[in-house]
Amino acid sequence: MRRYLLKRALGLVFPVFGVVTLVFLMIHLIPGDPVETMMGESARAADKQEMRHALGLDRPLPEQYVAYIAGLARGDMGISLRTHEPVFLEIVSRWPATISLALAALLIAAVVAIPMGVLAAARRGSALDKGSLVISLVGVAVPNIWLGPMLIIAFSLWLGWFPVSGRGEPLSIVLPAVTLGAGMAALLARLTRSSVLEAAGEEYMKAARARGLSERQVWMRHALANALLPVATVMGLQLGALLSGAVITETIFAWPGVGRLLIDAIESRDYPLVQGCVLNIALCYVAVNFAVDALYAVLDPRIRVER
């Protein structure tokens, strides 16, 4: 187990290095002058030069890259131009809101999708199965940018059940979590159905029925238990997507997370903060992939067998 995880961890070195390099090049090699973008064309040349020196943009690109890597090794992502606070602390202060929203969306998706997928598989070809297919297609097709405002209109403005925006009340998380988790629930429901149907044809299902187990025990204890590996894998990968894809949802609901911080940084032309947010989100994907690999080893011992 340890050797397997060590191999996977060493395999992350090049992806992390690539992510850091791409984020650096994204800002430094795109057309246009970032200083002029941040300060505007009306700024004085002396002020622009001072800003360029403060950001280290007047140095050769290789020297900037080395300084950037050295700063990251120390946990230094620069200073926010808007708040004059360290970028690292700005991002860390926003992660609890983003993580809580992503976990709530994941929980909603799992609670809705897994039972729906199992019931659809157990009643294959029935009206329930066809209805779940329609619901899944709708859930995948509806974008967050439309679903979020519709939920606000229906459940906040008309019914008054939930707050419109912000994070001030416990119920504030419900609408953004539903918005973020709807598409994932649709995907997981179809994946659960197909995985359970594949497991249903195995010999252990016949053996379970031969031992006199009820249909509920057969489907839940045997079919679902053996179909959870691909479902858990996709859930883990989707968690990374939720953490990064919350940008739109956090903006709609004014949720104070990393996604909202990124939008604010772009609007205020806060170059170091934009770079830090993008890097943070990208590295989150890498970390989630490693966590999924570890989960693989726990759920399926065959994967960690040494070859």
Image (tube, rainbow, N blue to C red):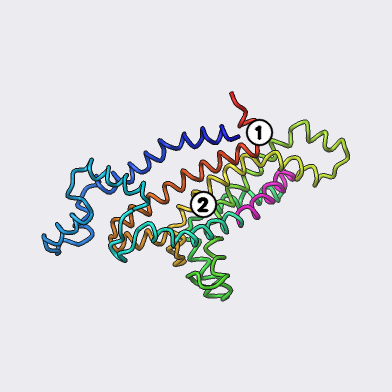
Residue found farthest to the right: 212
On the image, numbered disc 2 is attached to which residue? 141
Element marked by disc 1: helix
Q: Position of residue 255 (x, y in %)?
A: 46, 65
Instruction: Specify the amino acid type for callout 1.
Output: Pro
The crowding category of the residue bearing disc 1, from other C-alpha atoms within 10 Å (few below 14, some 14 to 19, many at least 20), is: few
Element marked by disc 2: helix
Q: Is residue 119 part of the magenta span, yes or no?
A: yes
Specify start and end residues of the magenta stretch as a single range. 108-126
Q: CA distance from mark 2 to mark 1?
A: 37 Å
Which quadrant holds the C terminus? top right
Which badge, 2 or 1, comes first in the chain's sequence? 2
- Name the quadrant containing residue 217: top right
Q: Position of residue 298 (x, y in %)?
A: 64, 39
What residue lies at 14% left-to-right and 62% top-to-bottom? 47
Front-most of 110 and 276?
A: 276
Q: Nearer the viewer, mark 2 or mark 1?
A: 1
- Name the quadrant containing residue 60: top left
Front-most of 30 and 290?
A: 290
Q: Is residue 116 part of the magenta span, yes or no?
A: yes
What residue lies at 63% left-to-right and 52% top-to-bottom? 110
Q: Position of residue 15 (x, y in %)?
A: 41, 38
Q: Please, what is the dominant secondary structure of the magenta stretch?
A: helix
Instruction: Specify the amino acid type for callout 2.
Output: Ala
Badge number at residue 301: 1
